[in-house]
């Protein structure tokens, strides 16, 4: 796998599933710098990567494996609302707004992910401002893409 293969159009947030790669424009030497600020974490099938309503201001990138996104719903309990595959970003909402997680991420296979805590990002801003700027711009695009995807789903359900 190259660093996150995505379909044509992912740079403008226009890929088919509402996600984009964080690292489309990160150069190999920048990867080496970035790895000093992140954790690479292994997980097992059926392991909770993070839990809804917990406070953890980190963003993550799935390197290997797959996971599902679960959201608590009144009356019916947890419901799968999305999935995460290799290269996808998750956790960026809590990263930006410093509020509890809005969903649970549950691994469906064994795998690995990168985790960047917000305080590590602040150190990166100080040490490597251009790289930090690339990351926050790409996180913003990913967030906008996810929002656009959710808006399309709302349109589908409200037009029925």
Image (cartoon, grey):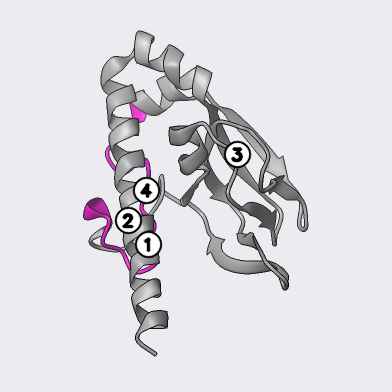
Comes first in the chain, label 3 or label 2: 3
Q: Which of these two is toward me, 78 or 117?
A: 78
**Disc number lying in front (3 or 1):** 3
Disc 1 element: loop
Question: Is the Cβ of the residue at disc 3 closer than 8 Å to that at disc 2?
Answer: no
Chain-order first, disc 3 or disc 4: 3
Q: Which residue is mark 2?
A: 145
Q: Please give the residue where the numbered disc 1 appears in the rendered image.
A: 18
Cβ atoms at labels 1 and 4 below 8 Å apart: no
Considering depth in this image, is 44 or 76 the residue closer to the camera? Answer: 76
Instruction: Give the percent coordinates (x, y) of residue 118.
Output: 50, 24
Q: Position of residue 29 (x, y in %)?
A: 34, 24
Q: Are marks 4 and 2 in contact (CB under 8 Å)?
A: yes
Q: Disc 3 and disc 1: Cα gap in Å?
A: 22 Å
Q: Is residue 21 magenta?
A: yes
Position of residue 152 measured from the top left corner of the image (x, y, whole percent): 33, 71
Range covered by the magenta-colored residues: 10-29
Q: How many marks?
A: 4
């Amino acid at each position: 796998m190259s660093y996150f293969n995505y379909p044509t159009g992912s740079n403008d947030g226009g890929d088919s599933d509402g996600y984009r790669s964080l690292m489309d424009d990160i150069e190999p030497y920048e990867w080496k710098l970035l790895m000093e600020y992140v954790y690479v974490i292994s997980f097992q099938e059926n392991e909770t990567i993070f839990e809804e309503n917990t406070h953890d201001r980190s963003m993550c990138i799935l390197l290997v494996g797959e996971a599902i996104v679960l959201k608590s719903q009144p009356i019916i309990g947890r419901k799968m609302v999305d999935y995460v595959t290799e290269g996808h970003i998750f956790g960026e909402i809590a990263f930006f707004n410093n509020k509890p997680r809005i969903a649970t991420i549950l691994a469906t296979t064994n795998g690995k992910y990168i985790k960047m805590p917000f305080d590590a990002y602040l150190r990166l801003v100080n040490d490597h401002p251009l790289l930090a700027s690339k990351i926050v711009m790409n996180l913003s695009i990913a967030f906008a893409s996810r929002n656009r995807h959710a808006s399309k789903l709302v349109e589908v359900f409200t037009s029925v």
